[in-house]
Image (tube, rainbow, N blue to C red):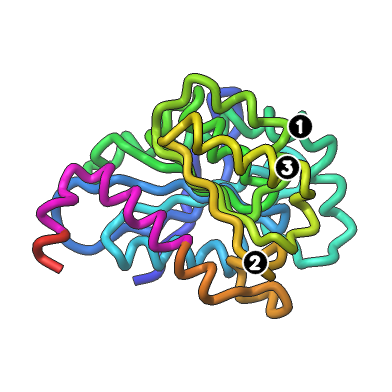
């Protein structure tokens, strides 16, 4: 069943939209919060939320751009620059929204209190910031951008973090990929996967030039495994599958 749009009260005043997809059945479940690319909560993101709900997890996709240009925008829209720059300042401004989204999830009877954040492109840094200081239990980054600015934020993080790129990602230069390749050797909780020949935006079917079904399937598998671990029911679910 497709999700619905709801409103979340901002701790700083005002409110923002959030796409919420709930699983069927009973019992408490973990959640995944989708931090969208600069296109916002578009069909790709809503479909992902619905897919996670179909696997039995709560999925939420907050509009992190509500302070400037709310709602989804199409690829190539000149407003993308305005809503995403200066990048580090905008990412910082969205941190309270990620906290407020988690607080909203805690009001849901079906939520078990543990959530992963899954970021795409612009939203990639939240895969690190979420477990670092925003209250999240795990993070997944898909073709994340500007992650070299956040590599030091991994210090002290013990939660699972999975970072996936393609080696042909124009937004992930060799310097970034090389730096992150070194991380798992000293931090076994961090997984870094770099796929040959894969472009920026591999998760998104609306980007046919970059979309990689195989890399997307791998990433979804890792995300579902992480959520399984947050459910506290991993062994039972694996035995039942």
User: What's the magenta region?
Assistant: 219-237
Residue 32, percent from left and from top? 41, 48
Q: CA distance from mark 2 to mark 3?
A: 15 Å
Residue 40 vs residue 5, the one in the foreground: 40
**Residue 32 drawn above or below residue 157:** below
Mark toward the start of the polypeptide (1 vs 3): 1
Asked if labels 3 and 2 touch by Cβ distance under 8 angstroms, the answer is: no
Q: Which residue is mark 3?
A: 176
| Tag shown at residue 32 | none
Q: Which residue is mark 2?
A: 196
Give the quadrant of the C terminus.
bottom left
Please give the count of numbered marks on the rendered protein: 3
Residue 97 vs residue 178, the one in the foreground: 178
Mark toward the start of the polypeptide (2 vs 1): 1
Mark toward the start of the polypeptide (2 vs 3): 3
Q: Nearer the viewer, mark 1 or mark 3?
A: 3
Outermost residue, right side: 78
Q: Which residue is drawn at the image coordinates 70% and 60% (left, top)?
A: 167
Q: Residue 92's quadrant in the figure? A: top right
Q: CA distance from mark 1 to mark 3?
A: 16 Å
SS of the residue under disc 3: helix
SS of the residue under disc 1: helix
Outermost residue, bottom side: 208
Badge 2: residue crowd in 10 Å (few <14, some 14–19, many ≥20): few
Left or right: 2 as drawn, with respect to 110: right
Q: Which residue is mark 1?
A: 88
Residue 238, percent from left and from top? 16, 60
Badge 3: residue crowd in 10 Å (few <14, some 14–19, many ≥20): some
Q: Which residue is drawn at the image coordinates 32% and 49% (left, top)?
A: 227
Badge 1: residue crowd in 10 Å (few <14, some 14–19, many ≥20): some
Q: Nearer the viewer, mark 2 or mark 1?
A: 2
């Amino acid at each position: 069943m497709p999700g619905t749009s709801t409103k979340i009260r901002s701790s700083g005043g005002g409110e923002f939209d959030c796409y919420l997809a709930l699983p069927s059945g009973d019992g408490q479940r973990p959640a995944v919060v989708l931090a969208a690319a600069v296109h916002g909560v578009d069909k790709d993101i809503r479909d992902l939320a619905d897919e996670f709900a179909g696997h039995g997890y709560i999925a939420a996709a907050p509009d992190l751009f509500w302070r400037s240009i709310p709602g989804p925008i199409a690829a190539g829209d000149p407003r993308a620059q305005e809503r995403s720059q200066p990048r580090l300042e905008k990412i910082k401004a969205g941190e309270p929204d990620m906290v407020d989204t988690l607080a909203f999830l805690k009001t849901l009877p079906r939520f078990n209190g543990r959530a992963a954040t899954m970021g795409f492109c612009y939203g990639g840094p939240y895969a690190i910031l979420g477990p670092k200081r925003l209250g999240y239990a795990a993070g997944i980054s898909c073709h994340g951008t500007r992650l070299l600015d956040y590599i030091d934020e991994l210090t002290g993080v013990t939660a699972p973090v999975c970072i996936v790129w393609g080696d042909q990602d124009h937004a992930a230069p060799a310097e970034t990929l090389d730096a992150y390749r070194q991380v798992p050797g000293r931090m076994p909780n961090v997984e870094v996967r770099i796929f040959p020949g894969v472009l920026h935006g591999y998760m998104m079917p609306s980007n046919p030039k970059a979309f990689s079904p195989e890399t997307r399937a791998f990433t979804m598998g890792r995300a579902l495994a992480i959520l399984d671990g947050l459910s506290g029911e991993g062994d039972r679910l694996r035995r039942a599958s």
